[in-house]
Image: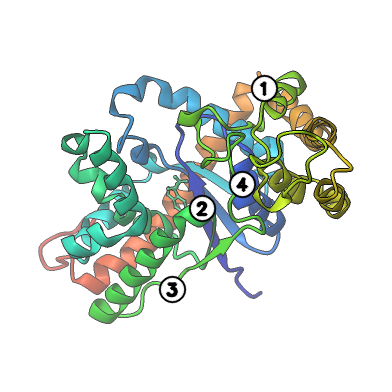
Amino acid sequence: MKMKQRILTGDRPTGPLHLGHYVGSLVNRVKLQDEYDCFFIIADYQVLTDHLKETATIGENIREIVLDYLSVGIDPQKSTIFIQSKIPAITELTMYFSMMVSLSRVQKNPTVKEELKSAQEAGRIDEITYGFVGYPISQAADILFVRAHLVPVGKDQLPHIEQTQEIARKFNRLFGEVFPIPEALIGEVPILPGTDGQKMSKSRSNAIYLSDSPEIVTKKVDSAITDPERIHSTDKGHPDICNVFQYHKAFNKEEAEEIEQKCKNARIGCVACKKRLIEKLNAFLEPIREKRAFYEGRDDLIREILNTGNKKTKKEAEKTLKLVREAMHFNYKELLTDNR
Ligand code: TRP
């Protein structure tokens, strides 16, 4: 039997997942879980990079993310869900990798650069930690410890995948072929803006969550920013710069073209356009809500999924780390009888 290729991707447990996560990565995960051997990481260490004072909430956030995964159709019979900090091999690999990336390369990572810039502007540059600047290296270890081939992610994560590829290549060159070079897989809708047109994020309160009720979805869409150049409903609209139209393109493909034409000719107003979107979004979210309701309160099932996932992942991680230690001459066989 031909071995399946592997997927690794995941999320930081900082809060519930939103529609941006869905179109960027979740939809691909669900689609590919038969074709690939999938591992989904809940990256709790990575939360420490900027939420150090909120560690008490991580556990509850992990639970929410597992619920989000299950409710969109990630099937624990097919895919493995695990918690980053429970896999010691990832930490070990992070240590090796951190010696293979120059400081200047770390500082050139565009996503990190952007984050440093906003910290600078907010007068918080002194709060940026060593661990924060290095998180793409730890993320490379997240991906490579299972020797993954494919990483379904949102577009903002691309620089990290590129850096992961560089690390894999460098390791292979220095110590021999251990790692495949993983490829990123970007969603069909690479970036979904928040309801205010800015990057969708929890901190900006502009996100629509997979767990939002119909009433909340209605409220959020009703107050969403539309085409800023369209003041009256008799004005012709510009769907290409309209935030709400991006949602139609992502969640209402069948009607998107018709809405685009009507908007351009002032034959549909923003209120009616939003109403159609609300119906579509709620229809899309309904089965997700039903699945969530099924799993909610079944904490024993969630416990079982995570315990089994961690156990299986640890086993696979050890296989890779064995190869890594062997390749790096870190076994000291003459000195040690026990290598773990
Ligand atoms: N940085 C990712 C995010 O914020 C989460 C993440 C951690 C991840 N480790 C990963 C994504 C490994 C893909 C692969 O969304």
Estimate how packed mark 4 is, as few (under 14), some (14 to 19) or many (20 or more) residues with alpha carbons within 10 Å: many
Q: Residue furthest left?
A: 335
Give whichever of 243, 73 is nearer the camera.
Answer: 243
Give whichever of 58, 228 is nearer the camera.
Answer: 228
Q: CA distance from mark 1 to mark 3?
A: 38 Å
Residue 198 coordinates in the image, percent (x, y): 52, 40
Q: Which residue is mark 4?
A: 192
**Tag 4: residue type?**
Leu
Which residue is depicted at the point 75% across and 34% down? 288
Sequence order check, earlier mark of 3 and 4: 3
Q: Which residue is mark 3?
A: 181
Residue 161 coordinates in the image, percent (x, y): 42, 63
What mark, if any, has residue 9 been given in the picture? 2
Residue 84 location, quadrant: top left
Residue depth check, mark 3 versus mark 4: number of the one nearer the observer: 4
Question: SS at mark 3?
Answer: loop
Sequence order check, earlier mark of 1 and 2: 2
Q: CA distance from mark 2 to mark 3?
A: 15 Å
Q: CA distance from mark 3 to mark 4?
A: 28 Å
Sequence order check, earlier mark of 2 and 3: 2
Residue depth check, mark 1 versus mark 4: number of the one nearer the observer: 4
**Tag 3: residue type?**
Ile
CB atoms of marks 1 and 3 within 8 Å: no
Q: Is residue 8 left or right of residue 99?
A: right
Give whichever of 36, 208 is nearer the camera.
Answer: 208
Q: CA distance from mark 2 to mark 4?
A: 19 Å
Question: SS at mark 2?
Answer: strand
Question: SS at mark 4?
Answer: loop
Pointer 1 residue Cβ closer than 8 Å to ligand 1: no
Give whichever of 316, 122 is nearer the camera.
Answer: 122
Which residue is depicted at the point 58% across and 40% down? 197
